[in-house]
Amino acid sequence: MSADWHQRGYRPEVASVIAIPGLRTWWRTWNDLQLNALVEEALDQNLDLAQSQLRLSQQRVLAHTAYATYLPNISAESRTLQEVAAIDSYVHARIHMSWDLGLFGNSQSLQRAADASVLHARAQLQVSRVALAAQVVRCYLEIQLAQYQRTLYERIATLDAEALRLLLVRQAQRIDSKRAVERQRLRINATASQLAKVIESQARAAHDLAVLLGQTQPKPEWLQAYTVMRMPQPTAPTLIALSADMIRARPDLQSAEASVELAAAQVGIAQAALYPRLMLSGSLLYSYNITQRRKVTSYLLPILGAQIDIPMLDWGRRRTLLDVNGLVLESSIRAYQQSVVHGISNVDASLVALQTQGLRLEGLAKSQEVLKQQARIQSVRQRHGLNSTLDTIQAERAVLQSRSDIGAARAALLLAYVALYKALCGAPPDSLQRKSTADTRHTDISGERYP
């Protein structure tokens, strides 16, 4: 397995070394107490995760009892029986014992199949954990972005309305044409449409988050608007190299490994079916005459023997079944190899997205600085009577739109982090300690940082 990454800035110098803070609890490194509480609440209340845990418990119980098929089986029964001449009646009591020895690897293959089912259930539980943590963080980020953008678009709508009022005055004074008024009205409609889209996205994310927490309704604060960009500030992971153990921790690889184990177990069972099946059996029969004219009062009859099942006439069918299971095993091995390739490619693609979103955010930040400078210039020129109010409004509107774009880019960057941690199988452990000493800081609409 190659440990080299193709993307710039991620070429390792030391093999099998990885430095990612808190991979098992990666969201805690983002220093957001509210996010920590939501993830922990989801781990307790999510119904899909609870179902996966119960399915794993079920498979563990079945695997624990799988070998019981090849343990001695003892049964007892009693019944009344009348002889052929219809003269005497008897009470029969019998103790029966049977023991399938499970020779030629049959018992081991059956246990291997049960263990594969446990491995598959564990992989599905891991899938639920990975997906749950990622989905909670995704919904949280979408809510925070929508809350911030709602305030921005409401302010943009106010500026657009003021610009329309000024354009109507200029039209009445024959300074501007009717076409300028129509363009402004189209801009107002576009802003209203964008605001409605943001509100819809916020509501959808809030309801999705409520479902993840096992609730029927979202919390009211999730549907509000804020002038604060409350998105967390993540710690940038430093990926030096990817170890093979980390790739194997991916749930899709665990599931593929379980498929290989199950196919190998089926091959073992089919192989054992080609050989004779030996079963020991014995019984102890006690009979008591209950009629008045009894010839024999009672008797005790022990029976002990062996049962051998030798494949003869259907040996060809069993051999064909073995060949078919061998092909299934080969296919499962290929699927496992494909899962390894897909896992490496998934991590690599996540690194590309993370790097690209970072460059996009840097470009938007530089553009915002230019727009802010232009807005300050327009404000100064307006105070000296060199520019109209419309020019100042347009400059301020461009700044607000830039802040909205930066908020979306920051959310996209955080979602790229989520995708990377998900690709690296960043999932909460079985037992999660619920304490966090993180310090939460946010950014307000003017760019200032405060606790």
Image: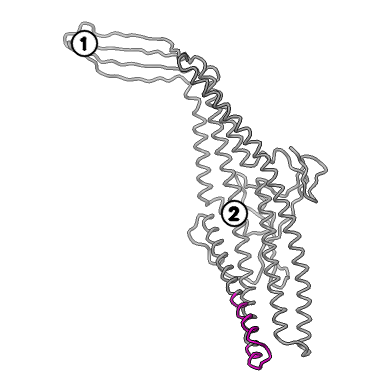
* Residue type at numbered disc 2: Gln
Q: Residues within 10 Å of mark 1 (few under 14, many from 20)?
A: few
| Quarter of the figure that contains the C terminus | bottom right
> Is residue 407 rendered magenta in the image?
no
Query: In the rendered view, would you say 16 is above or below 275?
Result: below
Question: Which residue is the site of mark 2?
Answer: 135
Q: Which quadrant would residue 124 be assigned to in this image?
A: top right
Q: Position of residue 204 (x, y in %)?
A: 54, 62
Residue at 72 percent of width and 79 percent of height: 395
Query: In the rendered view, would you say 163 is above or below 359?
Result: below
* Residue type at numbered disc 1: Val
Query: In the rendered view, would you say 228 is above or below 32?
Result: below
Residue at 57 percent of width and 46 percent of height: 128
Query: SS of the residue at dot 1?
Result: loop
| Quarter of the figure that contains the N terminus | top right
Q: Which quadrant would residue 308 be assigned to in this image?
A: top left
Query: How far apart in space, not on screen, are marks 2 and 1 (Cα)?
Result: 75 Å
Which disc, if any, is residue 84?
1
- Magenta: main secondary structure equals helix
> Is residue 177 rendered magenta in the image?
yes
Residue stretch in magenta: 168-189
